[in-house]
Amino acid sequence: MLPSELKQSLPSSEELPCSDDTPVDNEDQNLLPNVLLFLLSTIWAERMDWYFGVDMAIYHTTGANPRVPVVPDGFLSVGVERRKGGKSRRSYVVWEEDGVVPILTLEMVSHSPGGEYDEKLNIYAGLGVLYYVVYNPEFWRRDGHQPFEVYKLVNGVYELQIGEPFWMPEVGLGIGRCQMTFGNVPQEQLAWFDQRGDRYLSEAEAERQRTEAERREKERLAQHLRSLGIDPERLPE
């Protein structure tokens, strides 16, 4: 919690730009974090104590200048209003969120290296972000890293974690990769997982599963009736 006199000297969210105006490097930098947001809106539909930002500026006081934000591709904060004061946020201003910093940030590596493994890693460590996820499906060999990495802040230093999907008990979710179809296009995407390692499905996927389960049950019942010499198409009304 910041002292009140310091908070009074800091700019408000209305005075600050909502982003750094840097365009995304590729379409997945916008798509995949939004997929995580849409999934979370289903998983945590009843919860009003979280916020997931996509390509949004985070203003904080742990850098050289509180007017200079860091802009992750995605971030999750827990313990804040779902909608700040009932309205959409223009940016995420830590001193207006009772000092709550994101518990997770996500960076997707660009065609041009963007400091994901050094500069931004140090910024998020200084900010106190517990989990830092780097997704690098195309350029991991170039950068000497794995395609998917999760770092956890331990005593102020990020340590690379093992396992995928990786379970985050402080968040109550796991995160990892999967093959999904979005807009009829199959591709590798990021997804949320439960503690057993089962992927949370989208509403469309869950509905397809329910429909398929009902179809199989009807077919099973029809086969049983046929085994008894009953035509399932000629059942009495």
Image (cartoon, helix red, strand yellow):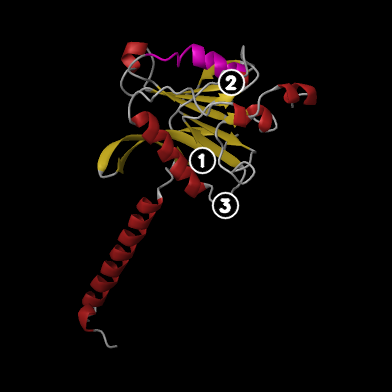
Q: Are marks 1 and 2 in contact (CB under 8 Å)?
A: no
Residue 38, quarter of picture: top left
The residue singled out by tag 2 in the image is 153
Q: Quadrant of the N terminus?
A: top right
Residue type at mark 3: give it. Answer: Glu
Residue type at mark 2: give it. Answer: Leu
Please say whether residue 125 is one of the residues in the magenta stretch: yes
Q: Give the residue at x 48% y 49%.
A: 42
The residue singled out by tag 3 in the image is 46
Mark 2 falls on what kind of element?
A: strand
Q: Are marks 1 and 3 in contact (CB under 8 Å)?
A: no
Badge 1 or badge 2: first in the primary sequence: 2
Using a 10 Å C-alpha cutoff, classify the residue at mark 3 as few (fewer than 14 neighbours), some (14 to 19) or many (20 or more).
Answer: few
User: Bounds of the magenta span?
Assistant: 113-126
28 lies left or right of 96: left
Total tally of numbered discs in the picture: 3
Mark 3 falls on what kind of element?
A: loop
The residue singled out by tag 1 in the image is 195
Q: Give the residue at x 55% y 23%.
A: 152
Percent x, y of residue 48: 60, 47
Percent x, y of residue 191: 42, 38
